[in-house]
Amino acid sequence: MAATSAGKTYHHGDLRNALICAAVDLATEGGPERVVLREAARRVGVSPTAAYRHFDGRGELLRTVRTHARRELAAAMERAAAREPGADDPGLAAERRVTALCRGYVGFAVEQPGLYRAAFCVPGPAVDEPLPVRPPAEPEILAFTLLREALEALAGQGAARPGGRPATAAAAWSAVHGLSLLLVDGPLRRLSAQRRGVVVEATLAMVVSGAAVG
Amino acid sequence: MAATSAGKTYHHGDLRNALICAAVDLATEGGPERVVLREAARRVGVSPTAAYRHFDGRGELLRTVRTHARRELAAAMERAAAREPGADDPGLAAERRVTALCRGYVGFAVEQPGLYRAAFCVPGPAVDEPLPVRPPAEPEILAFTLLREALEALAGQGAARPGGRPATAAAAWSAVHGLSLLLVDGPLRRLSAQRRGVVVEATLAMVVSGAAVG
DNA sequence: TGTACATCAGTGAACGCGCGTTCACTGATGTAC
DNA sequence: TGTACATCAGTGAACGCGCGTTCACTGATGTAC
């Protein structure tokens, strides 16, 4: 795009992506409520109106940011799992993968609180928007899928009750999600890094013990 | 107060409490972000300015609502525990109390989503407010205390590792908090009541198994 | 190769909204004498 | 018991803010001929 180096042309060339980047930055700085059309446009150096060429409105921009944030979360989990050393015992390996994924999850939340919150925001239908007859299917959330598959692998090793598995995965997700929010945005946000580590480990122990039971 | 029956006097008589009630209603309807000074005043039938005789500003009103919401949450937990039948075996009784408290916790969140979210909102310091040298100690959160004590009682029965206990309680809290938010405001909010029940039970099983380990 | 023209992607001004907060003020209350 | 006056608890208007969104518009681009 010629615009990139020359700067200042009338046509931006890649405005949609530029707006998304600005919006992601906003979410990173201050969470989903900070994602605001006018400010994103301002940062890109474009009039607010221009954004409407590329997005339906604020809602769509926010949903785009959310998708991005969810991908980043899953990527952080994968990276954490990849760092984990393997193990000969497949049961141990499975357990390690679960804990690594969880650590990656919580680590992302702690390091990117704004983005983490954006990953789970609900963009709120415009006031009094009529409810759709059938709500659109929620898109799969990759972070949850990773967790569920790792837990299934772990359960496959032991004597876990089949059929309880999706619910077991949801329970584990509850634990890491709740922990993340308590640490990031909630009553545990002032914990020292050390205490935080202790709480994280206790939660992981709970998740693993729950997987054995579930 | 003469004002109560006669209506319309210049002096309201109990404006502070009236504003709190209105603000709690707002939170109940739409969560903490719906708690807004002007609207609370409007509902009470008073000018916005009048609120400043009784509150420092929006922040104080919101903190008051939060306190109220936290109390309600704890009360819901206590009620749930009180409904639970006792048991001769003290270990079983302790376990039952833990699960009942947790059920009460999640039940409150599901029935009063707005209030639940208000209970854990952080009123956000005014932009660029200088950080206090020493952050004010977080007030104890009764819901957490209840949970911690019940878990301690449960651990006292078995061979749980001492010293791990506060962290174990935080892990349990993470689970019920995360579950509540996933159900109320998050990706699990469209679950049928039945599926929701399954997930709640799986989470409780995880919490109990974690208490045994921790 | 040049040019007319449709289309695309921006602009700038404006609307209406609701908010938090402050100002100068006034009506009501109750207390000292 | 009556009255002057301080104090308390309201009013109403206004300020400034930033937002989402829409309008009529124009500059730039690229394509058909």
Image (cartoon, coloured by chain):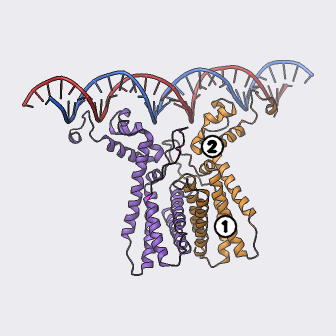
Chain colours: A purple, B orange, C red, D blue
Can the viewer see residue A178 in this picture?
yes
Q: Measuring 39% from the left and 79% from the top, which residue is drawn there? A: A87
Along the horizontal axis of the image, is A6 left or right of B47? left
Q: Measuring 66% from the left and 31% from the top, which residue is drawn there? A: B50
Q: Measuring 56% from the left and 65% from the top, which residue is drawn there? A: B171
**Nearest the eye: B173 or A163:** A163
Above or below A47: residue A166: below
* Labelled disc at residue B29: 2
Q: Measuring 42% from the left and 59% from the top, which residue is drawn there? A: A142
Q: Position of residue A13 (x, y in %)?
A: 26, 40
The residue indicated by pointer 1 is B98
Does the stretch in magenta take in B99?
A: no
Q: Which region shows up in magenta?
A: A127-141
The three-letter code of the residue at mark 2 reads: Glu
Q: Is disc 2 placed on a helix, strand or loop?
A: helix
CA neighbours of label 2 inside 10 A, class few (<14), some (14 to 19), many (20+): some
Does the stretch in magenta take in A135?
A: yes
